Image (tube, grey):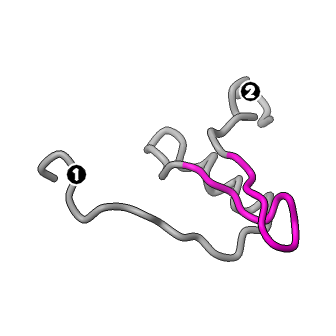
Amino acid sequence: QLDGEPHSDYINANFIPGYSSPQEFIATQGPLKKTLEDFWRLVWEQHVCTIVMLTVGMENGR
């Protein structure tokens, strides 16, 4: 948790087991503007070296 930010200790993410570890992967949604710093802190704190984004090319006409 960051000083002065009571809700900075949570991001909607889950560990996913892999072949060599029960916490080999992390799944989360793409960050919003207000959670962008939390997302990158997660990447930094968990020593993430690869980020994969899965998405469709068009959603809701966008």
* Residue extending furthest toward the front: 19
* Residue extending furthest toward the left: 61
Q: Is residue 21 left or right of residue 4?
A: right
Q: Is residue 40 magenta?
A: no
Q: Secondary structure at mark 1?
A: loop
Q: Is residue 16 magenta?
A: yes
* Between 19 and 15, the one nearer to me in the picture: 19
Which amino acid type is marked by label 2?
Answer: Gly
* Between 49 and 15, the one nearer to me in the picture: 15
Q: Is residue 48 left or right of residue 61?
A: right
Query: Disc 1 designates what residue?
Result: 59
Q: Residues within 10 Å of mark 2 (few under 14, many from 20)?
A: few
Which residues lie in the magenta part? 14-28
Residue occupying image coordinates x 20% and y 59%: 58
Residue occupying image coordinates x 58% and y 70%: 51
Rendered view: 58 above or below 36? below
The circle on residue 4 is 2
Q: Residues within 10 Å of mark 1 (few under 14, many from 20)?
A: few
Residue occupying image coordinates x 44% and y 64%: 54
Quadrant in which residue 23 is drawn: bottom right
